[in-house]
Image: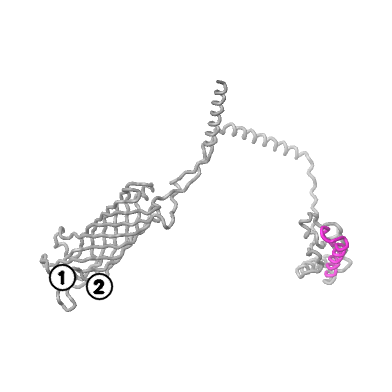
Amino acid sequence: MKKFILLALLGASILSINAQEKSNEIVYVEDPSQGYLFNRFKDNWFVTGEIGGNMYFSPGDQHRSWTDRFDPAAGIYVGKWFSPLIAARIGVDWLQVKGLSSIADAPGVDWNNPTVNGYYKQQFNHVGPVFDVMFNITNMIRGYVPGRKYSLVAYAGAGGYWSYARSTYGQEGSYTSGGYVNMQDRILTFRLGIMNSFRITEQVQLNLDIRYSGIDNHRDEPDLRWNKTSHDLQAYVGVTYLFKRREWYPPVVPVCPEPENCDPIRAQLAAANEKIADLEDQLAHCCEKCPQPEIVEEPAPLATIYYPINIYKLTRKDINVIEACAQVMKDNPDKRYVITGWADNYTGNDKINTRLRHNRVNGVKKQLVKMGVPESQLDVTINAGNLCDLGEKYVALDRAVTIEETK
């Protein structure tokens, strides 16, 4: 029984330790408040197919019954969402439109149908490429939510159509009817629309689309004007298929665990700060009574000339330095200067290093005298020690000649 109780206590302790360690772990979570990351270019593509109807509004159409002005329309698009707010799509649009014209031989006039208040009935097919920029209003107002069931999307775009007439005159004036004839006419269009998008599955959306299009009109007025803008109102039902990757992901940020009760630690820190402040006061009071040591600054040499290993000849830069030193000496004729030759003791041998020291210091003295410095101002010596004595790693600092003012 005692063994069982001990094992149970040991197990509870282990679980408690593990739970405490887990509670102290940093957790990484998605944070939508930080915005959303842009996906790769190959992500968030979609394809849309739509079918619907339209009503055409051109000059004179008010004489035609509105129930006789409905015509079918369709389109197919491929597009990409660049962010949760903005997308673009390109596709092909087809419209069949009906209108009226006061000109008997206007494009699209069908003589098989009776006139309406003296106007001739027309029928066209428009087909061509279109391009839209799309904006998700729901995501802008309410923020992006993965798996949202409904979104309101606005779009604007433009495109061009090739026009095909229901009937027309032949090349020799003979009348033709039946089928559609290419009018060799290319017209421009601009469009604005609102799309209600409903999420059916992760991959499929159902769209209810209301669109307005401004379309270049044909020559169907008495004054034979071209490219007068007409209007078209359309409604569509569409299906969109979303390719992977379909969602947008927010940045992942670390979430630190809730801190434990830190009041005892804060109390210890406050006590330690008080103790430090007291010790600083004691130290300041003690230092006021202690005499401050006098700091003696060793004067730096007037100049130091450094040499490569086993070299004592002066370079052009060295001569420039010596020339500046010579000018100082000539400006102060009452002062004397000592020139000391050095060589490192980590390379070579005593004989070689002694010769290098003499050659280096004599070369500098010779150059100073050549530049007009009296020999009486100069004392020449060598030093068998190391100039810096920082160790073998810094031997280049020991290969030098120093020029100092004699005190």
For the residue pair 386 and 291, the one nearer the viewer reads as 386
Is 169 placed above or below 206 here?
below
Between disc 2 and disc 1, the foreground one is: 1
Residue 198, given in percent of the width and then of the height, sits at 30, 49
Q: Is residue 113 visible?
A: yes
Q: Look at mark 2 in the image and give the residue it sits on.
A: 184
Numbered range of the magenta stretch: 340-367
Query: Does residue 106 belong to the magenta stretch?
Result: no
Q: Position of residue 311 (x, y in %)?
A: 81, 66
Residue drawn at x 53%, y 39% as measured from the top left: 25
Type of the residue with mark 1: Ser
Marks 2 and 1 sit apart, C-alpha to C-alpha, by 17 Å
Comparing 70 with 75, the one in front is 75
Indicate the position of residue 271 as horizontal and vertical percent values. 64, 33
Label 2 neighbour load within 10 Å: few <14, some 14-19, many 20+: few
In the image, farthest residue toward the top = 1
Q: Does residue 337 appear in this view?
A: no
Residue 334 on image: x %, y %: 86, 64
Quadrant position of residue 124: bottom left
Q: Is residue 361 magenta?
A: yes
Element type at marker 1?
Answer: loop
Identify the main secondary structure in magenta: helix
